[in-house]
Amino acid sequence: MNSKPEAYHALPGVAALLRTAPDLAAAKGHGRAVAALRAALDSARDAIRRGESVQTAEQIITVARSTLAQKCGTRPVINATGVIIHTNLGRAPLSEAAREALLKAAATYTDLEYDLESGARGKRETYLESVLAEVTGAEAALAVNNNAAATLLMLSATAQGREVILSRAHLVEIGGGFRIPDVMAQSGAHLVECGTTNRTRIADFERAITEQTALLLRVHVSNFKMIGFIEQPTLEEVAALSHARGLLAADDLGSGALLDTAAFGMAHEPTVQESLRAGFDLACFSADKLLGGPQAGIIVGKREPLDRIKRHPLARAVRIDKLCLAALTATLEHYQYGEALTHIPVWRMIATDAERLRVVAESWREQVGGAVVPVLSTVGGGSLPGETLPGYALALTVPTPDYFLAKLRKCDPPVIARIADGRVLLDPRTVFESQFADVVNALKACLSEGSGLIDPSLNP
């Protein structure tokens, strides 16, 4: 047993630990660092009472760092999975311009709802609306906190108490239990189904119209694919029928593509511009998926229905704040200036060619071993189901792949990888260049002798 007094005296004090790791207090604040170090020292004393060896200063500091990391809310992680829009990892990372705009808005007062020219109250989305109009071709626009809110608000403001006609093929559920029929019911609109699961024609919509109909709705199924004996009316057919009968046509596009994905060897994802050009009165979509911005939902379309939507009481409840507004505007400006492929991370990752990824994977292999293998990356986030992007990844053969992934997740920063064919894969497509060294350091630490590579529970 190491319960002798000298074992306790061998433990460093808080002041000595802070001198050893001055960055700890600088990064997290002196008070938080002291509290974390005291907790780590208490754990070290408990270990001594159990007869374990005295922990070194570095071990105690490591425990304190881990404690502080767990208490900081969301943590930055390295996404080496190859899934570009990874819902569990926060979806789309922001561009440098979007991050800078967000920080500026957070650091001081802004002209959020203030007209600098007149000195009177202004509208928070005047400039954003003008950028969206230029990028999409819409007459008007509104941003809310996510696309679920956009769909709910759009239906509440334009069809409450009236009928909305929807193809049975579009009665979908997306992630998190978001079901179109449930949202429809919450909005106060009455769902009218038409057609069949696999085949719906424009005549099905026409037969379903009554005096109570307000809107014809199309929903992009996003996260699954139907093939074979299928049919849906064209956008132009739906828009033409709705206008001939004095109704609105609305399109819930989900992922919010503003660029043609077919240019990168994938299937064509319906774009916002196509819906508006086809004559749809309204279209709503996410900002944090293929658009590549912060979490938000956007409604674009014709001015009259959008004016109604803006006046609806629910609009204030789901509006975006100044931070989201700043980041979203900066993201959309990349499209406005024709720089989305070079400045927005999601599109830069989609556009990265396989040879570039092979070079990165080879560099990792030279430093840590393993093999470079061809892989298929995915877009993710419910976008382009079944579509893949060819590339290369580093493959590691380890005794216990699941435990190795767990070790990677405990690194600082955590590295998130995946397993395929019994090997651990690290896909550079979704890793930022500034993170390459962190990936190598994490792999070296996890592969080093005595790092706990093999799950101790399997080797008692």
Image (tube, rainbow, N blue to C red):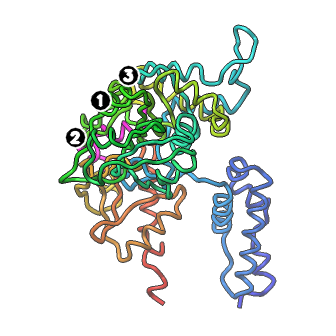
Judge whether 385 appears above or below 307 on screen. below
Residue 114 shows up from this direction = yes
Q: Which residue is mark 3?
A: 338
Q: Which residue is mark 2?
A: 265
The one of 271 and 439 positioned closer to us in this rendering: 271
Q: Secondary structure at mark 1?
A: helix
Task: Work out how far the residue at label 2 is from the one at label 1, CA to CA, in angstroms.
Answer: 26 Å
For marks 2 and 1 on the same chain, the one whose residue lies earlier in the sequence: 1
Residue 78 percent coordinates (x, y): 47, 52
The one of 375 and 221 positioned closer to us in this rendering: 221
For marks 3 and 1 on the same chain, the one whose residue lies earlier in the sequence: 1
Q: Amino acid at mark 2?
A: Gly
- Residue 236 is marked as 1
Q: For the residue carrying disc 2, how many other residues have a C-alpha within 10 Å: few (<14), some (14-19), or many (20+)?
A: few
Residue 445 percent coordinates (x, y): 46, 64
Judge whether 85 appears above or below 287 on screen. below
Q: Residue furthest front?
A: 211
